Image: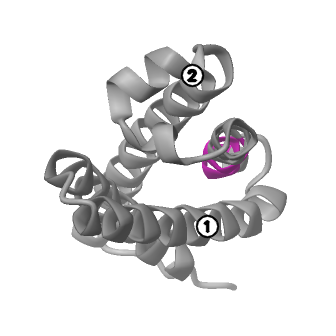
């Protein structure tokens, strides 16, 4: 005769709620960065300069390349939807890449005294770090 061990219901509920919260954050991250990357790839440079300002001092190829990187990292955040075994390492790598990019851009915006965009990057960091920490344990 074998005995089974069951996880207590409160623990299962907590894990289920944490999973839902992490997927929600991952969806927000992906939506933001897919939209931002798409805008950087498709909008004329004059519109990007009017919207953000910093593309005026950056080469066009760098702005377009950053758009590609943002889309690729956003897709990496959603990669566990396809396969958890394959997608989880991609998710963790994408989250680290986004954190590095967000922290770098936050510092650049703060140094150029563009505090609105620095605050946006701070919020993005506050969303991405819990995803990395929460999914790292799983």
Residue 6 tag number: none
Q: Is residue 80 left or right of residue 45?
A: right
In this view, the residue in front, 96 or 107, is 107
Q: Is residue 75 magenta?
A: yes
Q: What residue appears at the point 62 percent right and 44 percent down from the top-left corner?
A: 70
Rendered image quadrant of residue 60: top right
Would you name the residue on which mark 2 appears? 45
Nearest the viewer among 14 and 91 is: 91
Q: Tell me whether the residue at label 1 lies in contact with that at label 2, contact meaning CB atoms closer than 8 angstroms.
A: no
**Was residue 109 drawn as part of the magenta stretch in this picture?**
no
Give SS at disc 2. Answer: helix
Q: Is disc 1 placed on a helix, strand or loop?
A: helix
| Residue linked to disc 1 | 97
Quadrant location of the C terminus in the rendered image: bottom right
Image location of residue 128, percent across then percent down: 40, 61
Q: Position of residue 31 (x, y in %)?
A: 48, 30
Residue at image coords 44%, 34%: 32
x then y, percent, for residue 107: 33, 71
Which span is picked out in magenta? Answer: 72-78
Rounded to the nearest angstrom, the CA distance separating label 1 from label 2 is 25 Å
* Viewer-side label of 1, 2: 2
- The crowding category of the residue bearing disc 2, from other C-alpha atoms within 10 Å (few below 14, some 14 to 19, many at least 20), is some
* Upstream in sequence: badge 1 or badge 2: 2
């Amino acid at each position: 005769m074998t005995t089974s061990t069951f996880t207590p219901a409160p623990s299962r509920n907590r894990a289920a709620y944490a999973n839902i919260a992490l997927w929600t954050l991952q969806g927000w991250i992906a939506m933001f960065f897919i939209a931002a990357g798409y805008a950087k790839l498709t909008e004329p440079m004059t519109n990007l300069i009017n919207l953000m300002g910093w593309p005026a001092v950056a080469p066009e190829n760098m702005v377009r390349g950053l758009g590609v990187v943002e889309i690729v990292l956003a897709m990496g955040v959603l990669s566990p939807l396809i396969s958890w075994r394959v997608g989880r390492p991609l998710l963790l790598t994408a989250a680290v890449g986004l954190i590095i990019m967000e922290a770098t851009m936050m510092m650049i915006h703060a140094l150029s005294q563009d505090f609105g965009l620095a605050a946006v990057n701070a919020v993005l960091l506050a969303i991405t770090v819990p995803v990395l920490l929460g999914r790292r344990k799983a």
